[in-house]
Image (cartoon, helix red, strand yellow):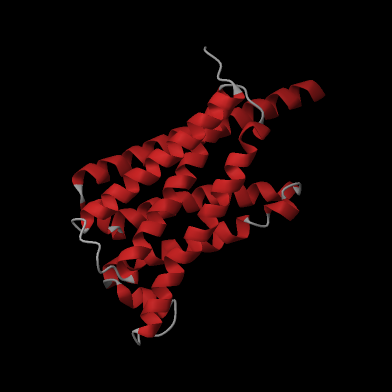
């Protein structure tokens, strides 16, 4: 196995992030035939959601690759700090801008305004979005509670939230009406699942090693 250096791992992480964000921008632009001269909040907020998910997906893939190549977590410390700030901003603006515009348009306040923004058959996807947002915002408390024994459940919840967001976008995302981007989205889902399985497998292996050392 060819081992990546720390610098190469950083380049891979940044390159992967840039690539998936660019793919999202292209898919979003194509959905409006690149007629972007009169954009409104209703056209802009989906791009923020795509960006947030794309970067979070890149986080999982980069983390799995880092573990695979045996690099320390600090190898991607700066990468995660910078891109996590972007993710936090976009996941707040994605529903926030929509709620603000709906309120300006006389549709009331959330969650009712967002639920009424979609067809009744798609409201489950809005609820998935609300649930995931709450989980992702709660995860920001890791700075204070990451060392607590119960914090692992916050990580589990964050992983589940990623699954919810995957289906949230699959149901509501206008850009995903494109066949090629829908195929890319399914690829994101498969690789995310693979990264998750690998990461939990590594944790279980480490746990078994620790337990065998105690016995």
Whether residue 108 can be seen here = yes
Residue at the far bottom in the pictured view: 106
Q: Is 77 displayed left or right of 89 in the figure? A: right
Residue located at (48% from left, 34% from top): 195
Q: Position of residue 21 (x, y in %)?
A: 39, 46
Residue located at (37% from left, 37% from top): 190
* Res 185 → quadrant: top left
Q: Is residue 4 above or below residue 37?
A: above
Residue at the far top in the pictured view: 1
* Res 128 → quadrant: bottom left
Q: Position of residue 124 (x, y in %)?
A: 36, 65
Residue located at (58% from left, 26% from top): 7
Q: Quadrant of the C terminus?
A: top right
Q: How many marks do you count on the picture?
A: 0
Residue at the far front in the pictured view: 37
Q: Position of residue 114 (x, y in %)?
A: 38, 74
* Res 172 → quadrant: bottom left
Q: Is residue 62 above or below residue 110?
A: above
Q: Is 215 displayed left or right of 70 in the figure? A: right
Q: Is 185 displayed left or right of 211 in the figure? A: left
Q: Is 169 displayed left or right of 79 in the figure? A: left
Tell which of 32 and 110 is nearer to you: 32
Whether residue 132 can be seen here = no
Q: Is residue 174 above or below residue 60?
A: below
Q: Position of residue 57 (x, y in %)?
A: 45, 43
């Amino acid at each position: 196995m060819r081992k990546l250096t720390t610098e190469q791992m950083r380049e891979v992480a940044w390159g992967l992030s840039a690539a998936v964000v660019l793919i999202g921008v292209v898919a979003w632009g194509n959905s409006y035939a690149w007629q972007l001269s009169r954009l409104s909040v209703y056209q802009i907020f989906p791009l923020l959601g795509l960006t947030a998910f794309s970067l979070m997906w890149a986080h999982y893939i980069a983390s799995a690759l880092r573990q695979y190549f045996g690099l320390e977590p600090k190898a991607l410390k700066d990468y995660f700090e910078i891109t996590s700030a972007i993710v936090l901003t976009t996941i707040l603006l994605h529903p926030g801008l929509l709620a603000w515009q709906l309120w300006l348009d006389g549709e009331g306040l959330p969650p009712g305004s967002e639920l009424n923004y979609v067809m009744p058959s798609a409201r489950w996807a809005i609820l998935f979005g609300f649930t995931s947002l709450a989980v992702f915002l709660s995860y920001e408390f890791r700075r204070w509670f990451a060392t607590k024994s119960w914090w692992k459940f916050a990580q589990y919840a964050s992983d589940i939230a990623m699954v919810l967001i995957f289906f949230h976008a699959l149901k509501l995302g206008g850009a995903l009406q494109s066949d090629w981007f829908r195929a890319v989205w399914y690829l994101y889902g498969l690789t995310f699942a693979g990264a998750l399985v690998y990461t939990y497998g590594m944790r279980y292996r480490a746990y078994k090693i620790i337990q065998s050392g105690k016995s």
